[in-house]
């Protein structure tokens, strides 16, 4: 059976930084060439391009 992981983070991440090292690491944990990401928008004026 494949080990499952849920990684939650807030306050940035995914495309918020000039480097993608954290994004690449987290996506690499999935072991999938096409990982699924759930983006939960907030009421604090998220950038429209993320939606």
Image (cartoon, rainbow, N blue to C red):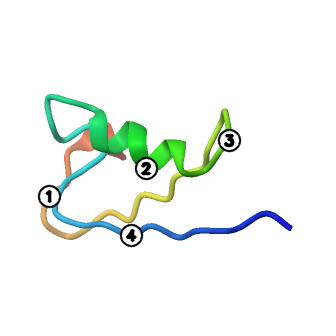
Of the numbered discs 2 and 1, the one sitting upstream in the chain is 2
Residue 18, given in percent of the width and then of the height, sits at 14, 29
**Mark 2 to mark 1: distance in Å?**
25 Å
Residue 12, given in percent of the width and then of the height, sits at 19, 54
Of residue 1 and residue 33, the one placed in the foreground of this image is 1
Of the numbered discs 1 and 3, the one sitting upstream in the chain is 3
Q: Judge whether 41 appears above or below 36 on screen.
A: below
Residue underneath mark 3: 32
For the residue labelled by badge 2, is the local secondary structure a helix, a strand or a loop?
helix
Residue 41 is drawn in which quadrant? bottom left
Q: Looking at the rendered structure, which numbered label has been put on residue 12?
A: none
Q: Number of marks in the image?
A: 4
Q: Judge whether 2 appears above or below 46 on screen.
A: below
**Mark 3 to mark 2: distance in Å?**
11 Å
Of the numbered discs 2 and 4, the one sitting upstream in the chain is 4
Of the numbered discs 4 and 1, the one sitting upstream in the chain is 4
Residue underneath mark 1: 45
Residue underneath mark 4: 8
Of the numbered discs 3 and 2, the one sitting upstream in the chain is 2
**Alpha-carbon neighbours of circle 2 within 10 Å: few (<14), some, or many (≥20)?**
some
Image quadrant holding the N terminus, namely: bottom right
Q: Judge whether 9 appears above or below 12 on screen.
A: below
- Nearer the camera: disc 4 or disc 1: 4
Residue underneath mark 2: 26
Q: Is residue 37 left or right of residue 9?
A: right
**Alpha-carbon neighbours of circle 3 within 10 Å: few (<14), some, or many (≥20)?**
few
Q: Is residue 41 left or right of residue 33?
A: left
Of the numbered discs 3 and 4, the one sitting upstream in the chain is 4
């Amino acid at each position: 059976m494949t080990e499952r992981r849920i990684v939650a983070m807030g306050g940035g991440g995914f495309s918020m930084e000039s480097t993608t090292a954290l994004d690449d690491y987290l996506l690499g944990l999935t072991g999938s060439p096409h990982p699924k990401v759930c983006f939960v928008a907030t009421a604090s004026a998220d950038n429209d391009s993320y939606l």
